[in-house]
Amino acid sequence: MHDHRKLGRELDIFDTDPLIGAGLPYWLPAGAAIRYALECYVRDLERKAGYQHVYSPVLGKRELYEISGHWQHYRDGMFPVMDMGGEHVVLRPSLCPHHALMFRARGRSYRDLPLRMAELGGQYRSELSGALGGLTRVRAMQLNDAHIFCTAEQVAGEAAAALAMIRQAHAALGVEPVRYRLSLPGRSAKYVGSRRMWDRASAVLTDVMVSCGLSFEPEEGEAAFYGPKIDVQVADSAEREASIATVQVDFYQPERFSLDYIGPDGAKHRPVMIHRSVVGTAERAVAHLIDTHGGAFPPWLAPTQLVVLPVTDEQQAVAEAMTRAATERGLRAEIARDASLAARIRAHHLVPYLAVIGAAEAAAGEASIRLRDGRKLPSMGIAHALAKIDSQVKAHTVELWTDRAAGG
Ligand SMILES: [Zn+2]
């Protein structure tokens, strides 16, 4: 394990500036490339699983959070209210209330359910400055969020599907959870709603974990104020645990927002809301990826995927053409010319693919591919090499070169 703060700066992933403020990191080009790749991957996964993407504003009226219950139960974590000429708005502490209103804004029928609404959106937490640091304790974050509005009968199936999606994404990222936690309410007064509601929601989540064959640890006092949750826990280099993904069952907010749909019987029914996140916030996800991989990211996430190395200036034109062809394919590629070949290979030891082009390779239109793990592949045609690297990247795996993904 590595320290994401130190590596994050060294690798041009993120940094902070006191003039911007504590807990407000900015993303440098390498970090932006990783985050963009992560966002595209998650959106694609969600789209294929029947989610619809939306955008909603990062501000909302105080009244909205009074209805959702955040104002009463989560106020310590919220930014101060801004008075806009008598209208009181606040930076949102979560996306749920906006999505509940978007569900309510149209008449819904049972045929529309399950309705899966996803957004990669900003949310804000008023952490004290002493607690802030790196990408893990921040005041502004981008959450991979979704809310599934469904019937009571659909809850177990939807929660299990969300859990399966989480496991698929974590395999692609090379993330190994330390444990699954069933987060239950504690004795404090912050947990809202009836005992029956909590028991029902906890029973569904327990059944889902058992049917998925996952072992888990129940923990009291870790639930959201509105419902219990499955939290997928990871640990950092100091063995501090954090939730990187979650599935929550909520009977409370549909009640508070008076959500309904028309059932097959023509009458109004109340939907259940499942809150789920596959990778959590972009900030925490990337911090954990840096911790886990030490900068040697899976090929599809690597900020630079391919570096082309002409042995001498004679091969410059061929190397430039290869770099251009790679970029046109959508790969993140660059050329490295200065310094000795050995020094250039060392300097790019975190890059998954290096393409060395000497006199013989240039004459034949070929390149020698070196993988990050030290493997050297026999010289191959440049177009063929790029097609193989591209298919490996598109396979979204942690493997550098597999026959299945790179075959043909
Ligand atoms: Zn939510």
Image: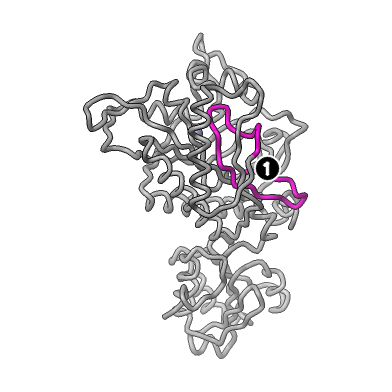
Q: Is mark 1 on a helix, strand or loop?
A: loop
Q: Which residue is drawn at 43% across and 53% down?
A: 45
Q: Position of residue 130 (x, y in %)?
A: 77, 32
Q: Which colour scheme is used?
A: one colour
Which residue occupies 47% across, 52% down?
Answer: 165
Amino acid tagged 1: Thr
Q: State the image coordinates of residue 23 (x, y, percent, origin top left).
A: 69, 36
Task: Tell me where residue 154 appears, x and y as whole percent.
Answer: 37, 41
Q: In which quarter of the image is residue 190?
A: top right
At a point 66% along the width and 23% down the height, the residue shown is 188
Task: Say which residue appears at 41% left-offset and 40% top-offset.
Answer: 155
The C terminus lies in which quarter of the figure?
bottom left
The x, y position of residue 260, in whole percent, is 33, 26
Q: Provide the residue designation for mark 1.
A: 136
Q: Is residue 1 left or right of residue 74?
A: right
Q: Which of 123 and 277 is in front in this view?
A: 277
| Residue in the foreground of this view, choosing between 75 and 3 | 75
Question: 10 Å neighbourhood of mark 1: few (<14), some, or many (≥20)?
Answer: many
Magenta region: 219-243
